[in-house]
Amino acid sequence: MANSQKKQKILEVAARLFRDKGYPATSMRHLADEVQLKASSLYNHIGSKEEILQTICFDNAHRFAKEMKGIQENSTLDVTEKVKALIQLHIEMATQEITSVTAFNDEWRHLSEPHLSNFMKMRKEYEGAFKALLQKGMEEGTFKQKNASILLYTLLSSFRWLYDWYKPGKSIQIQQIKDEMIDSLMNGIS
Amino acid sequence: MANSQKKQKILEVAARLFRDKGYPATSMRHLADEVQLKASSLYNHIGSKEEILQTICFDNAHRFAKEMKGIQENSTLDVTEKVKALIQLHIEMATQEITSVTAFNDEWRHLSEPHLSNFMKMRKEYEGAFKALLQKGMEEGTFKQKNASILLYTLLSSFRWLYDWYKPGKSIQIQQIKDEMIDSLMNGIS
């Protein structure tokens, strides 16, 4: 494996350990065992447990920010299509960028300052942009709900099961998850 | 406070500590501080940290099982009304029975055997009953989705933000949360 692939593998295994055992209870020794490296070799790839957490949190935050910007600026999409694109983005991140679990499963709370504040600022900006889009849909009468916060958090929450449940190779295809979730969230179930 | 009220308060504070710090990192000493009791007085109410976890998990599991049974057996409700009643139940539990966070935030994973297996069995039965209801709605054409698992987990996930976010006294009323969430989950947003 090339070094960049090895590093990616380390980040993914770390994210899974953080999810299953919690960040405080995960040791570098345990991580080394899981990726089958000696602790000394692990440190060739990564400086510390906190550096892993920072890398994971900010890689994901920048990815979400970039995708949001692309969707916001895409003038060929109406507000419904923009919300659909964001639902797709969250399903893709949950099923393909498995480190993104750390940003959703609250392990980011263990970041030290100033990283914690920076991460929370990016998170707030992302949620603000998503909420503004829902608000716009409500104002123009496309969406019929009244409270953009309730709708935002209901949507963002609805993806969380994917982090516990989805494993590559599951018999359900990602495309089917996208189709069914977009349909139930946009059009309801009844 | 009567003893039963004190015990309820201890369970609620413990559930909040488990959520914020994780079960392994929560000590009985810390719990005693938070409920303003001496450790020795705390043990008059509760035998051990594990006993707290067991009480919380099984009180909630029995409550959900009982409510599910009532809804299943209520022949005046059609399948849509039954699903609405379950959505209401989850919102009520998240906003009023705050210990239920422990059953949703995965802290139940720290139960010892045979309690862990018993809890997982009750959880599986509850999810199975909920899924059967969704399946029935799909078969009779009331719900248009095809995959009951995706729909079940999307619904169950969608309540999780309430545990992080809802605090009594928030300016949003529980009735508004119910109205908006039932509307968006049953009828969609667009």
Image (cartoon, coloured by chain):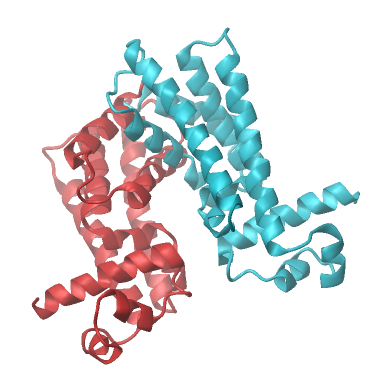
Chain colours: A cyan, B red
Q: Quadrant of the N terminus of chain B?
A: bottom left
Q: Would residue B123 appear left or right of A33 to someone viewing this image? A: left
The residue located at (59%, 64%) in the rendering is: A23
Rendered location of residue A113, percent (x, y): 58, 55
Residue A118 seen in this snapshot: yes
Q: Nearer the viewer, residue B40 or B44?
A: B40
Q: Nearer the viewer, residue B94 or B115?
A: B94
Judged from this view, the residue extending furthest toward the top is: A76
Rendered location of residue B63, percent (x, y): 22, 61
The residue located at (36%, 38%) in the rendering is: B135
The residue located at (67%, 71%) in the rendering is: A27
Q: Quadrant of the C terminus of chain B?
A: top left
Judged from this view, the residue extending furthest toward the right is: A2
Q: Nearer the viewer, residue B154 or A112?
A: A112
Judged from this view, the residue extending furthest toward the left is: B2
Residue B58 seen in this snapshot: no
Q: Would residue B178 appear left or right of A183 to someone viewing this image? A: left
